[in-house]
Amino acid sequence: MTSFKDSRDYQILFLSLFLILGILTRDWTLHPEMICVAIASCIITQIICSLLTKSPDTIQPINIRSPLITSLGLSLLLRADHWPTMALAGFAAIASKFVFQFGEKHFFNPANFGIIAVLTLTNDAWVSPGQWGEEWWYGLLFAGTGGMILQRVGRWDTTAAFLGAYSLLAAIRNMWLGWTWDVYFHHLMNGSLLLFALFMVTDPRSIPNASMSRIIWAISIALLTFILRNYFFISTAVFWALFTLAPLTILLDKFWVTPQFIWENKTEIPACKDTLYTEV
């Protein structure tokens, strides 16, 4: 793996392995054709939108890594009864990058946008946050692989802020209700929650640029997730929280002005379109 020149290659590898692992060990009701539909719809939409929006005076390679990662994220998290629903999710996810932009930067996480789109527009799509169970070795696997990517791109602060705030709120509620601590740890050792914290909420293409704004943003998402999950009993709270607070990125980037992240140089410098960090 040391031969990978782009850190997104690691994410493609890890998400692919998670998908295979989940199918083999969790007995998911996910058919191979659904994965193919997700991949095809994301890549085709990326190609069409890139051709429609690119400047006629420039020659720019079409970004394939980004839609592939988005499609893998959809395959991991989203379930649908019919393939047009999965195709709609892929289309909405990638199209959102080109439609909802502010200053050459999209502010919705593509996979999250695709999930919310089909949850609201169709009646045969669902997300199963508990599909990974609460087995400890899944948590170690996600933390190890996710940590490798975060170390390369410097987004540990976002994950730490989200998990730290959510863990603190859960601990306070656990003590208030008088529950034992095994209930608390059982609640936190959720594979989908860790996948979200390590691979979705850390997308620098759609999250705030500055470290301080990322911390504020992540804590806000943790707070809204906690409220939606424990007081409105929404099982998909993390996805709705991220979707609802995504536009906050625009405001925070205005308060803390920091150049965007570019993969190739692994440094914070003014960005070129389609060269930024990955979308899950």
Image: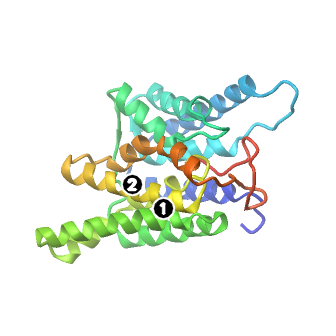
Check disc 1 and give the amino acid type.
Ile
Q: Is residue 169 above or below residue 213?
A: below
Q: Quadrant of residue 101?
A: top right
Q: Which residue is mark 1?
A: 215
Q: Is residue 49 above or below residue 182?
A: above
Q: Residue at horizontal 48%, vertical 59%? A: 21
Q: Quadrant of residue 189?
A: bottom left
Closer to us: 40 or 180: 180
Q: Is residue 186 above or below residue 9?
A: below
**The disc label shown at residue 31, or none:** none
Q: Residue at horizontal 39%, vertical 69%? A: 164
Q: Is residue 267 left or right of residue 149?
A: right
Q: Which residue is mark 2?
A: 220
Q: Is residue 71 left or right of residue 65?
A: left
Q: Position of residue 55 (x, y in %)?
A: 81, 27
Q: Residues within 10 Å of mark 1 (few under 14, many from 20)?
A: some
Q: Residues within 10 Å of mark 2 (few under 14, many from 20)?
A: many
Check disc 2 and give the amino acid type.
Ser
Q: Position of residue 16 (x, y in %)?
A: 57, 54
Q: Quadrant of residue 85?
A: top left
Residue, far left? 178
Q: Secondary structure at mark 2?
A: helix
Is the residue under label 1 in contact with that under label 2 (CB below 8 Å)?
A: no
